[in-house]
Amino acid sequence: MRRRLFLSLTSLLLASSTLARAVDATPALSHEPAPPLMLANVYRPGTVLDNYWVSEKLDGVRGYWDGEKLLTRGGAQIAAPAWFTAGWPHVPMDGELWAGRGQFAKAVSTVRQQTPDDTAWRAMRFMVFDLPAQGGPFTERIPALNGRISQIDQPWVQAVAQFKVPNHPALQSLLVKTVKQGGEGLMLHRGASLYKSQRTDDLLKLKMHEDAEARVIAHIPGKGKYAGMLGALLLEMPGVDGRPRQRFKIGSGFSDEQRHSPPAIGSTVTYRFRGLNNSGIPRFASFMRVREDPLL
């Protein structure tokens, strides 16, 4: 009986959510071809740190200024207020639209609006970490980037600080400190690298936990104190490197509100984990958030 009640309640909530989106629908963001971005691989022990610059990994929305307009990584044109991009140079800038540590949902909500919310954009910053068309190795692009940001001279446009870390214990200590302060992790950028529109070891991400995305297949009813609520999500991870798609359950990381109103079936969620077991299933997987828009 409780299971039927939970499933009925879930269906009602999903229907209400769909209706609310239909009533409050805004025009979809217009799209360009996806910008030619440099994408990061995961940091591995043994990386020669002398070759890399280190910066904080910002938990926001990837933003690409193509010299005329601001785009997401998927090519959606961002409807930023005119004042936000006024006076920006006619050269590409790669960065993160960031609302501050722990404010990922706020950044996504602001960027997704077709009609910009001026108040919300006042809390946003464009944190620039590269000049794709500058040429030369990254070590030489850093001063060029800092000079360009100084010329823009707007408090909401900032260059991401790049620095050197002497050894791996210092890197791990910095990672722990950054995460404790609300940061997501660290980025490592090879100083000798050119800007390449591909996933490469010239750019690495380092976090306390790995994370990935999967599609919600089903809601598993809870038991005990979670009776009548969500107990776990059944997720399907995409097949990669020749491996078949696999399904697994996540039962931790949810707030009470999320257990009462779980992510919709068919939606994509982000989860964190600590490596894979022999069958390829994530170990110690925990829910993080719903991915609002896969094009962001």
Image: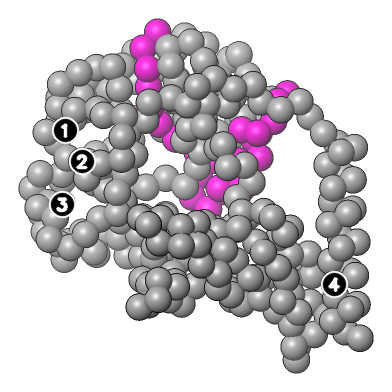
Which amino acid lies under the numbered mark 4 shown in the image of this protein? Answer: Leu
Residue 178 in the image: state x and y as whole percent.
Answer: 35, 57
On whether residue 40 falls in the magenta region, the answer is no
Q: Position of residue 269 (x, y in %)?
A: 59, 57
Query: What label does residue 202 carry, if any?
Result: 2
Dot 4 corresponds to which residue? 7
Quick one: label 3, few (<14), some, or many (20+) residues within 10 Å?
A: some
Residue 155 visible in the snapshot: no
- Name the amino acid, label 2: Asp
The residue positioned 83% from the left and 57% from the top of the image is 14
Q: CA distance from mark 2 to mark 1?
A: 6 Å
Question: Which range of residues does the magenta coloring cover?
Answer: 89-115
Q: The residue under label 3 is which amino acid type?
A: Val
Nearer the N terminus, badge 1 or badge 4? 4
Tell me the residue that label 1 is attached to: 193
Q: Residue 151 sits in which quadrant? A: top left
Is residue 96 visible in the rendered image? The answer is yes
- In the rendered image, residue 272, in percent from the top left (x then y), is placed at 47, 65
Choose the circle earlier in sequence order: 4 or 2.
4
